[in-house]
Image (cartoon, rainbow, N blue to C red):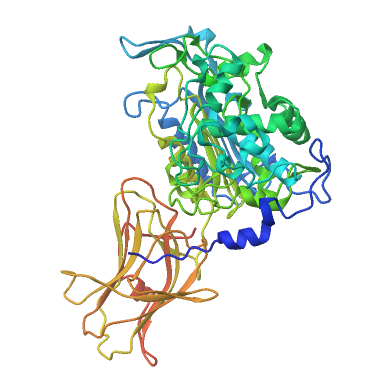
């Protein structure tokens, strides 16, 4: 097992800091009513600017675009999306805002030939910066924000039972399900049910009331649309306002999100990305080309307004929402949440379910779509139509990838490769400066590889030799960085235990680190075995799935108290380093 340094807030600390007895937030509530119009102090608002102004490396933002464009071609058999809008930035600067491909390309899908039937060229619509997308499950973030607002105001309790607000919900063994369990997908609900088959709104609700938990509440993580549909019903009951009204009055109005709403008007259609030729058997409903209406069948059957899907928006509005949360709940002079409330959305409540980290509404630390942007604090969400939002408080950066990946049909795309590629490039765009000097050794970010950085054989027979260096690492969930030694010319390698130190010392008895270190430099020391020809190497091993931001090694030095055996700052010694997959990097 590898060693990992992962600074994080414990659930006990979180409870002590943010929760009072009974589960209500331990902060003074806002007055009931719409979100506050002013904040005592302004935080960054967004404007377009250069990568340099944002503190980002231009080459990697260019690579983000070129990589995204490859998925407009077969990948591997069909395009992953017909088009996309990419937006990336840091601080108050949007350094990349680029449309690619087509917003509307296909009028139908031919299942016999597995091809898309295109509109005539003059009727196709290219992507634009302000193209509006059906966000699909990214809509869940808005519902979650509305719920956290009500928690903040003391109207809703995080640990309160759902049935206390909706007595009908308590049927079929759901009487103990809590608001927190809805927000973190630990309620026990199955993933979804076809509400659209019920003929009336009342009968659709009855299906929810009658739905028994698939697992005991709190025992399992299982992502479910029914959680946010239920939360919608709670919000509407306790506020007396419909979800679309809440969205307008509490979020989009105060923040000035003019392109974000449920049920966009017909006049918006020319600037909306088309989705699917929805027909059975791949769709639950016979609708033909869905364009300007919600794609999700259950949301459509609920009138386009649902807690789990139905919000339409564009890249700029989502960036403003992301900036608001990175600002601690404020944008310009508008405040929609207090910092303590935002903290709940970025803190893992699912520590009992490793790999399914989840704040209130937001998913956390998910390499499968965040790529190397993923840290224990990185928050985001995806949508089935091809959308995603990723926020990294560690670097104060944000990434929006909006694609119409179900156009013309959902079966053309699989996985999340374009999102991962975008996340990797965005992470790489945030420079890691060398600990000393102009360059440091960088492992790269390739998957399914073994990159090695090997020092020449040294005489450590005195028994007092030590390795010292600076180390920076952010390693994917199944990857590792190891320090190893050989005394037989490389025929066999064994681990070298070491200690890292920043504010406190951390031993690594297996000679290995993995996971996230905080994206800071650590001082490393290692006592070395005594041998006349001892060679050392760093080995960075990655699997074929996801990588982290990689590893950096700097200021390598081997010596005893009175003699320097190797110093990478000396040109002659540096020239003897053998690097396979590692590069000397200035960033």
Q: Which part of the image, by quadrant, shows the N terminus?
A: bottom left
Residue 269: x and y in percent read: 62, 14
Q: Quadrant of residue 261?
A: top right
In the image, is residue 110 above or below residue 23? above
The relative height of residue 211 versus residue 501 in the rendered view (above or below) is above
Res 280 seen here: yes
> Which residue: 54% across, 11% down?
199
Decide which of 118, 482 is in the foreground and name it: 482
Q: Position of residue 66 (x, y in %)?
A: 45, 35
Left or right of residue 329: residue 563: left
Which quadrant of the view contains residue 48?
top right
Instruction: Point out residue 122 in the picture as x, y percentages from the top left corner.
Output: 53, 8
Instruction: Count the numbered circles shown.
Output: 0
Viewed as shown, does residue 534 lie left or right of 240?
A: left
Q: Toward the viewer: 172 or 315?
A: 172
Residue closer to the observer: 188 or 128: 188
| Relative image position of residue 259 (x, y in whole percent) | 68, 26
Residue shown at the point (42%, 59%) measured from the top left: 515
- Location of residue 157 with respect to 255 vertically, above or below: below
Above or below residue 584? Residue 412 is above
Q: Nearer the viewer, residue 569 or 264?
A: 264
The answer to whether residue 316 is visible is no
Residue at 35% from the left image edge and 65% from the top image edge: 2
Left or right of 309? Residue 543 is left
């Amino acid at each position: 097992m590898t060693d990992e340094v992962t600074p994080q807030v414990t659930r006990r600390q979180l409870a002590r800091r943010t929760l009072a007895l009974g589960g209500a937030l331990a902060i003074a509530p806002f007055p009931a009513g719409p979100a506050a119009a002013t904040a005592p102090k302004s935080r960054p608002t967004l404007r377009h600017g250069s990568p340099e102004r944002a503190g980002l490396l231009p080459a990697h933002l260019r690579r983000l675009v070129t990589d995204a464009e490859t998925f407009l071609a077969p990948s591997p058999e069909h395009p992953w999306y017909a088009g996309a809008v990419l937006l990336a930035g840091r601080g108050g600067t949007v350094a990349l805002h680029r449309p690619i491909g087509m917003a509307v390309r296909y009028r139908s899908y031919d299942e016999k030939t597995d091809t898309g039937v295109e509109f005539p060229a003059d009727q196709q619509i290219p992507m634009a910066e302000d193209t509006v997308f059906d966000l699909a499950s990214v809509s869940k973030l808005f519902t979650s924000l509305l719920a956290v607002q009500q928690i903040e105001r003391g109207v809703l309790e995080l640990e309160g039972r759902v049935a206390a607000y909706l007595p009908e919900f308590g049927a079929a063994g759901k009487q103990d399900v809590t608001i927190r369990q809805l927000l973190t997908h630990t309620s026990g609900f199955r993933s979804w049910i076809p509400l659209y088959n019920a003929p009336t709104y009342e009968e659709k609700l009855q299906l929810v009331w009658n739905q028994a938990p698939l697992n005991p509440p709190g025992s399992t993580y299982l992502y479910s649309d029914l959680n946010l549909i239920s939360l919608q019903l709670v919000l509407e009951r306790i506020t007396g306002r419909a979800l679309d009204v809440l969205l307008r009055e509490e979020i989009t109005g105060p923040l000035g999100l003019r392109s974000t709403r449920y049920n966009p008007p017909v006049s918006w259609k020319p600037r909306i990305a088309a989705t699917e030729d929805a027909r059975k058997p791949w769709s639950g409903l016979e609708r033909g080309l869905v364009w300007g209406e919600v794609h999700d069948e259950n949301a459509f059957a609920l009138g386009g307004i649902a807690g789990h899907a139905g919000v339409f928006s564009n890249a700029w509005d989502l960036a403003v929402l992301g900036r608001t949360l990175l600002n601690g709940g404020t944008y310009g002079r508008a405040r929609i949440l207090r910092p303590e409330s935002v903290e709940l959305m970025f803190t893992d409540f699912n520590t009992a379910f490793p790999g399914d980290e989840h704040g209130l509404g937001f998913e956390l630390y998910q390499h499968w779509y965040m790529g190397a942007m993923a840290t224990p604090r990185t928050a985001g969400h995806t949508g089935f139509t091809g959308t995603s939002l990723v926020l990294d408080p560690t670097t104060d950066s944000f990434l929006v990838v909006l694609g119409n990946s179900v156009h013309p049909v959902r079966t053309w795309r699989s996985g999340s490769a374009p999102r991962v590629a975008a996340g990797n490039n965005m992470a790489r765009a945030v420079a890691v400066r060398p600990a000393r000097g102009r360059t440091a050794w960088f492992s790269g970010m390739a998957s399914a590889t073994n990159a090695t950085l090997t020092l020449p054989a040294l005489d450590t027979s005195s028994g007092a030799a030590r390795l010292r260096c600076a180390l920076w690492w952010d390693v994917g969930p199944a990857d590792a960085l190891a320090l190893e030694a050989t005394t037989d010319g490389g025929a066999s390698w064994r681990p070298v235990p070491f200690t890292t130190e920043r504010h406190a010392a951390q031993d690594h008895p297996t000679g290995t680190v993995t996971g996230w270190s905080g994206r800071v430099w650590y001082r490393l020391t290692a006592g070395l075995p005594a041998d006349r020809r001892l060679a050392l190497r760093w080995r960075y091993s990655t699997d074929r799935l996801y990588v982290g931001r990689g590893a950096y090694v700097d200021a390598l030095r081997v010596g005893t108290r009175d003699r320097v055996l190797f110093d990478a700052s000396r040109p002659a010694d540096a020239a003897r380093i053998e690097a396979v997959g590692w590069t000397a990097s200035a960033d």
